[in-house]
Amino acid sequence: MSRLQLALNVKDLDAATRFYSTLFATEPSKRRPGYTNFAIANPPLKLVLFENPTAADKLNHLGIEVESSEQVAEESDRLKKASLPVRSDQQTTCCYALQDKAWVTDPDRDDWEIYTVLEDAETLACSTCT
């Protein structure tokens, strides 16, 4: 199953986590210092919260979570054939997970990632997420 990802900068992680838990009637699937994510079944959504009180914008980035590295590669190839510049990150640690991903930027300069999670990691370790 693929699902849309919405990554937001929030001022108060605890308050935001309580709000989104209530809004989507689900508990977080992962909590770490400065970070919470929800794997929401209905609607299919990966909601990621980054505690970032000084962020100029609410939106951190957008994404599409897919099931496998093969799907990341297929989507990357499809976007390249459509003449979009694609940046690839393989075996990268980001958002407390080891991931394979591809990035594109929309006309308004918002970043979109297509990614799969390979395994959990102990560190946030991504420059694009904070």
Image (cartoon, rainbow, N blue to C red):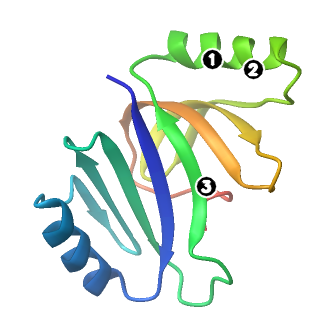
Asked whether 76 or 100 is in front, the reply is 76
Q: Could you tell whether 94 is left or right of 80 in the image?
A: left
- Amino acid, disc 3: Cys
Q: Could you tell whether 42 is left or right of 64 in the image?
A: left
Q: Secondary structure at mark 3?
A: loop
Q: Nearer the viewer, mark 1 or mark 3?
A: 1
Q: Which quadrant of the view contains residue 12?
A: bottom left
Are there few (<14), some (14-19), or many (20+) residues within 10 Å of tag 3? few
Q: Secondary structure at mark 1?
A: helix
Contact flag, marks 2 and 3 (Cβ < 8 Å): no
Q: Which residue is mark 3?
A: 126
- Label whose residue precedes the other's in the sequence (1 or 3): 1
Q: CA distance from mark 2 to mark 3?
A: 23 Å
Q: Is residue 22 above or below residue 56?
A: above
Are there few (<14), some (14-19), or many (20+) residues within 10 Å of tag 2? some
> How many marks on residues?
3
- Label whose residue precedes the other's in the sequence (2 or 3): 2
Q: Which residue lies at the image location 65% right of the left edge and 44% below the top edge?
A: 112
Q: Nearer the viewer, mark 2 or mark 3?
A: 2
Residue 77: horizontal and vertical position, in percent?
A: 73, 12
Q: CA distance from mark 1 to mark 2?
A: 6 Å
Residue 1: horizontal and vertical position, in percent?
A: 31, 22
Q: Which quadrant of the view contains residue 75?
A: top right
Q: Is residue 1 above or below residue 117?
A: above
In the rendered structure, find residue 79 and report the number of the disc placed on it.
2
Contact flag, marks 1 and 2 (Cβ < 8 Å): yes
Q: CA distance from mark 1 to mark 3?
A: 22 Å
In the rendered structure, find residue 75 and report the number of the disc placed on it.
1
